[in-house]
Amino acid sequence: MRAQSTPRVLGAALVVAVMVVILSIRLNTFRDYQIAEIAIEVTAVAGLTVLTGLSGQISLGNGAFMAIGAYTTALITLHLGWPFIAVLVIAAAVTAVAGAVVGLAAARLHGPYLAGATLLVGVALPSVANAYPGTFGGDQGLNVVFTTPGFLGVNFPLTRWQAWVCSAVALVTLVLLANLSRSRVGRNWRAVRDNEVAAALAGVNVARTRILAFVVSATCAGMAGALLAIVTELVAPGAFTITLSIALLTAAVIGGLGTLPGALWGSLVIILVPTYATDVATSHGLSSSVASNIPVAAYGVVLILVMLIFPQGIQGGVRWALGLFGIPSAPARPAASVPDVTPRAGAAPASQHTVPARKGSPPESQEKEGTP
Amino acid sequence: MKHGSVLEVSEVSVRFGGLTALNAVSLTVAPRQVVGVIGPNGAGKTTLLNVLCGFLRPDEGQVLIDGRHYRNLRPHRLAGLGIARTLQGVGLFERLSVIENVMIGASCRATAGFWPALLGLPQSSRDERRLRQEASQALDRVGAAGVADAWPGELPYGMRKRIALARALAAKPNLLLLDEPASGLAEAELDELGGLIRELAAETSLVIVEHHMDLMMSVCDSLVVLDFGKVISRGSPQEIQADPAVTAAYLGASGSDDD
């Protein structure tokens, strides 16, 4: 990721914040709700794009981290009634711990094994809510009470306040992740992604670096879950299916893996394309059986088109377009790619002793000599 | 033997199943000494380097670094102990620019941690500037200052090897382990490499694993010859050249497999 100076990042965040405020005031309640939805998606996707694009680890379980954040929020609000800012911090901390636990296991896994392990987390964890209905409310879930603060007056629309809170959290998250990405932390993530053996020899603690990426990613997902809880005002297992985890990864990939603006583009596609397609379908008087399938079809078509035209995601397309006007947003760089999910040649347990062969690099002789 | 040697390997054995890759190998590296490890393919040279780096734990024997034994030597701790290593081939980070590659090597001496980085504090950017400066110096040292902003994939092989060396140098090591530094280099580049190694020997110790005999004979202070995991000869380049056991090992092994 090209280093963006702090003033530029803060400036961009401020511009977006002003746009959100203006839009939320001018648009109707449903659009305000969508702004909140997009902000939630951005928060979670930004964390995932850092994990997958920078540290090279895949996660199909970030929906579960969202569930942890959401349930933490619901339980604290319900039992303790703390203000949301405090609840958000606790939710972030709890998911950070959960991320560390999963990351600890993930640090030893690669490719399909990591995808499988995180998939397991994504599927299994949300159903814990069903196992303990007394605490988590079972299928019905838990209600979350969220109101506008008094100083805004009684007539201030709740959805607008929700949109503001979500957007604020999303923007702060993006600024902090941008800081991390261009620091030594981000560079270590990319080094570990590209060549673990060389990174270790250069003094990078590979396991710790990979776990840290999981913690950061899980924390973002946890905050997104907390936001989801106060926007939908209901936390139930049905909201955290594996589809959610996959949608997050989809958004990260079509936006442009490893790029924070890409998290925004991907989230816009994921949230807006289905609703826009529904609007078009209903306004053309299609039969309900056709109309209800249009959003899914449109979503699929958009995914295929984006990946065909911009293999590096929408942000890759944006860079290319800026380049046409002679604006250097970033130098041409080797393509970011989805982490390899095919098994490595050679047994995984021995991988510490071998130099992992990389596509595009000159053939390296295997380091382990003397083995039969 | 306190602080007399930078590195002391005593009686190290490594077995892979029934195969003995290293058999009671000993090796001592004094400050600012250049020690070469040679031997036919499959002799255990890289296994020895892997033991030194903590990638492999020896089944017997021990490794002393600056006279101290580290029970749980992990590869990433080496840089902090003043040991840097280059890999066979190049092993660069393909999606990091050249200067970033070298900055990774320098980062064992970084001071700012996670929180200053997250919050974008001045402490973090000061640290970054210092690392960048040190990385530039290391690139300068190997004659690669001009390609700091390039991507490794755009560069010729010889230049990539220099950058890998610069990354190791950026750690400012007391001991530099070079795994086949000459492989794939052109004749002219070999001379430069030899000169650079002698220059480096003024301030650091080196252990070099290499097949290129002319280079090894010209840069090494002392040589260790391995064959089938055993030390069959050791001494100055002249002594090694005169040793009939070495000649026999090379000629005898010429028909066998390679690694």
Image: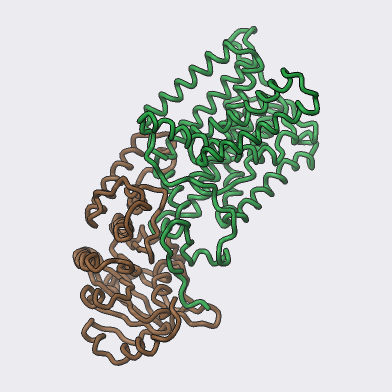
Chain colours: A green, B brown
Q: Quadrant of residue A147?
A: top right
Is residue A297 depicted above or below A209 in this figure? Answer: above
Is residue A220 among the parts visible in the rendering? Answer: no
For this view, does B120 lie left or right of residue B15? left
Q: Considering depth in this image, is A56 or A303 the residue closer to the camera?
A: A303
**Residue A172's x, y, as percent?**
49, 28
Q: Quadrant of the C terminus of chain B?
A: bottom left
**Residue A9's x, y, as percent?**
41, 29
For this view, does A207 lie left or right of residue B92? right
Q: Considering depth in this image, is A4 or A90 the residue closer to the camera?
A: A4
Marks counted in the figure total 0
The residue at 43%/51% (across/down) is: A191
Q: Considering depth in this image, is B117 or A290 the residue closer to the camera?
A: A290
Is residue A228 depicted above or below A346 in this figure? Answer: above
The residue at 22%/55% (across/down) is: B143
For this view, does B154 lie left or right of residue B60? left
Q: Considering depth in this image, is A227 or A93 the residue closer to the camera?
A: A227
**Residue A93's x, y, as percent?**
57, 37
**Residue A46's x, y, as percent?**
53, 36
The residue at 48%/61% (across/down) is: A356
The residue at 61%/53% (across/down) is: A114
For this view, does A224 lie left or right of residue A196? right
Is residue A72 among the parts visible in the rendering? Answer: yes
Is residue A295 depicted above or below B139 in this figure? Answer: above
Q: Quadrant of residue B42?
A: bottom left
Q: Quadrant of the N terminus of chain B?
A: bottom left
